Amino acid sequence: MSAAGTGPLSSGSPEPGKVRDMFGGIARRYDLMNTVMTAGMHHRWRRLGVEAAGLSWGGRALDVCCGTGDFAFALHDAVGPSGSVTGIDFSRRMLAVAQRKAERSGRQVDFQWGDATALDFPDDSFDAATVGFGIRNIPDIGGAFREMARVVRPGGRVVCLEITQPERQPFNFFYSLWFDRLVPVVGRLISRDGGAYSYLPSSVKRFPPAPRLAGMMQEAGLTGVSYRLLAGGIIALHTGTA
Ligand SMILES: C[S@@+](CC[C@H](N)C(=O)[O-])C[C@H]1O[C@@H](n2cnc3c(N)ncnc32)[C@H](O)[C@@H]1O
């Protein structure tokens, strides 16, 4: 497994090659970890993200940093079989898990290798683009939002779901207990990769707070940017219009 807990992953900006190796190493256990760490709430958060995307039946959606595909599957349920959903990720192992899940569930999602900061799609290709728990891992956050804004048609939505640091007590106390102490231990037990789950709290700590992230979306050319906090302020759901 990668040296995920050392070097550039434990401090400073995430290094894309190491991030890719780390997610590749935990791909098979990623879904189980998500469910354990969020007590199953992650599905509800993605459903709220899909609602924020404002898609209709037959719509075209892109999920960036799709990982094992859960956000893309939720988008598929919103656009139906007459719509289209593309999921991109730069970890082939995460994509392989997503592809297997698509085959097992019979849901048609086009999973492709791709880099969030250089999307291989023409302008205005989609009605909405989402990113779930992915933007935190990208050094050039503004670049990723600019790309999402570019490939979404004017008037379509860009949605970002991400872990954030709660500002209010007692949430920040429990958050710190859970993230700093328990997540690395539980992560080591389930994924057998303590480094990956030590990376998680540090990546959240250096991530911009929700108001700043909204500003970055605006700077990327999105309008009407707004956000709501979920789960006591631990999760931020940002929406902007291309
Ligand atoms: C925490 S997982 C999130 C997966 C999924 N979106 C979800 O909701 O569970 C983050 C994913 O982002 C991917 N990723 C990180 N940086 C990327 C980049 N620059 N381009 C494409 N994928 C990237 C990783 O490979 C990983 O699969």
Image (cartoon, grey):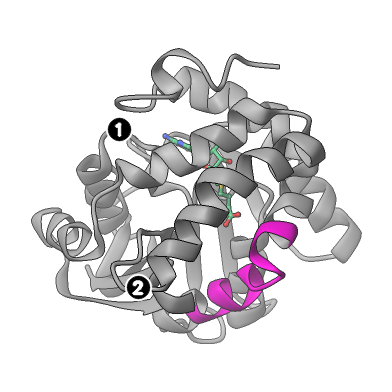
Q: Secondary structure at mark 2?
A: loop
Measured as percent of width and height from the top left, residue 99 is found at 77, 47
| Quadrant position of residue 226 | bottom left
- Residue at 22 percent of width and 58 percent of height: 213
Measured as percent of width and height from the top left, residue 23 is found at 62, 33
Seen in the image, is 56 located left or right of residue 117?
A: right
- The residue under label 1 is 139
Q: Nearer the viewer, residue 169 or 112?
A: 169
- Asked if residue 164 is positioned above or below residue 193 in the image, the reply reads below
Q: Where, quadrant-wise, is the N terminus in this rendering?
A: top right
Q: Say what amino acid the circle numbered 2 marks.
A: Gln
Q: Where, quadrant-wise, is the C terminus in this rendering?
A: bottom left
- Mark 1, Cα crowd under 10 Å, few <14 / some 14-19 / many 20+, is some
Seen in the image, is 83 located left or right of residue 62?
A: right
- The residue under label 2 is 169
- Residue at 12 percent of width and 62 percent of height: 218
